[in-house]
Image (cartoon, rainbow, N blue to C red):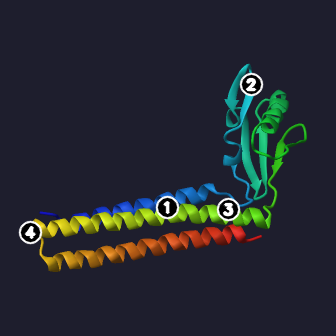
Amino acid sequence: MIDVKQTLQESEERMEMAAMFLEEQLSRIRAGRANVAIVSGVRVKSYGQLVPLNQVANVSTPDPRTIAIKPWDRKTIRDIEKAIMDSDVGITPENNGEIIRLGIPQPTEERRRELAKQCNKIGEKAKVEVRNVRSDIKDRLKKAIKDGLSEDNEKDAELELQKLHDKYIKKLDALLEAKNKEIMTV
């Protein structure tokens, strides 16, 4: 026979995973703010090898619109600058001889709308996952009636499941709303 409490706990864990997935995905979307992850894929030719940028320089964000790159060896500054220009970062580096600065441009209204759409798509995936969890558990509860679970217990469990579903959908909506507000704020 099915353990109703354990089944509901399992469903809550799966719904929490969907919320964590959404939170992680939304954190990767940057709306005109400097983030060292922007240059994390840049590879620099150093001492005859291609190495990640963070292995030849200190990468930091001194303010919300700037990424500062301070090479450990000043001789590599030209190589770093060339690697940034050749990468798909899309930002022209400014070099003062010691530090390379990348100015992050303010996104246009159109770009902010695209980012908001992207966030909503990711949010919809997470909501679909929460709904799928609810559907799976409902099916299990229906089958459990045949295995001897009383209909009253099944109805109570279904009600509890619906409450969990509503709670997590509300949580996902709140995450999306906060991210959209961050994106659309100029």
Name the disc covering residue 125, or none: 1
Estimate the spatial distance between the alpha carbons at disc 1 and disc 4, rounded to whole Å: 35 Å
Is label 4 in a helix, a strand or a loop?
loop
Nearer to the camera, 59 or 121: 121
Report which residue position mark 3 lands on.
115
> What residue type is disc 1 on?
Lys
149 up-or-down from 103: above or below: below
Name the disc covering residue 148, or none: 4
> What residue type is disc 4 on?
Gly
32 up-or-down from 164: above or below: above
Q: Single out the mark in the foreground, 3 or 2.
A: 3
> What residue type is disc 3 on?
Leu
Residue at the farthest top position: 48
Report which residue position mark 2 lands on.
46
> What residue type is disc 2 on?
Ser
Whether residue 68 appears in this view of the structure is yes
Tell me residue 138's x, y (percent): 27, 69
Circles 4 and 2 in contact, beta carbons < 8 Å: no
Residue name at image x 73 percent, y 71 percent: 185
Residue name at image x 36 percent, y 60 percent: 14
Going from N to C along the chain, the mark reached first, 2 or 1, is 2
Is label 3 in a helix, a strand or a loop?
helix
Going from N to C along the chain, the mark reached first, 3 or 1, is 3
Whether residue 4 appears in this view of the structure is no
Estimate the spatial distance between the alpha carbons at disc 3 and disc 2, rounded to whole Å: 35 Å
